[in-house]
Image (cartoon, grey):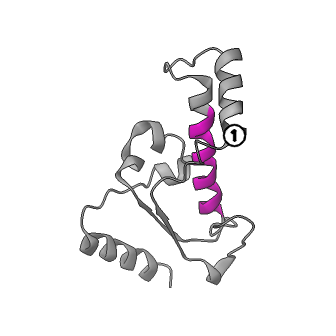
Amino acid sequence: MSEGINFSDQLGRCIVMVGLPYPNIRSPELKEKMDYLNANVPKGLDGKSAGQQHYENLCMKAVNQSIGRAIRHLADYATILLLDQRYQRPSVSSQLPDWIAKDLQKMDKFGSAYAAIRKFFSGKK
């Protein structure tokens, strides 16, 4: 949903990512691309096929582009809510930008997340 939208400064202070935006695995174009990669590119060091790596990269590219819709310049700020426990997996969190991954916090309860968000924004006034 964020493709092509620019939420600069006060227009975008919170990004909410629910789940991981994997592309449709049944898409004929994606299936052909994955089959081609699997047939022509060796597996990675992690043992994943090239097609699987491509599929995961497409997902994380969408996550990173969505995050970038609110963070447009050095002085800009926003809170980013990644609502899926899979973001805690090293294979997923390692594909987030370093400046986000270093501040990634796991919150199990709404109350603690709300308090952290409130503290973040009160420090920006």
Q: In this view, does 80 lie to the left or right of 29?
A: left
Closer to us: 22 or 35 = 35
Q: Position of residue 49 (x, y in %)?
A: 56, 22
> Residue at point 41% right, 38% down?
90
Q: Main secondary structure of the magenta part?
A: helix
Closer to us: 31 or 5 = 31
Q: Where is residue 106 in the image (x, y as percent from the top left)?
A: 32, 56
- On whether residue 60 falls in the magenta region, the answer is yes
Total numbered labels: 1
Question: Farthest residue in the right direction?
Answer: 4
> Residue at point 63% right, 48% down?
61
In the rendered image, the quadrant that contains the N terminus is bottom right
> Residue at point 63% right, 14% down?
42
Q: Position of residue 74 (x, y in %)?
A: 67, 65
Look at mark 1 in the image and give the residue it sits on: 28
The segment highlighted magenta reads 54-68
> Residue at point 67% right, 16% down?
39
Closer to us: 73 or 53 = 53
Mark 1 residue element: helix
Q: Where is residue 30 in the image (x, y as percent from the top left)?
A: 68, 39
Q: Is residue 95 above or below residue 104?
A: above
Which amino acid, mark 1? Pro
Q: In this view, does 64 lie to the left or right of 103?
A: right
Judge the density around disc 1: few (<14), some (14-19), many (≥20) Cα neighbours within 10 Å: few
Q: Is residue 19 above or below residue 50?
A: below
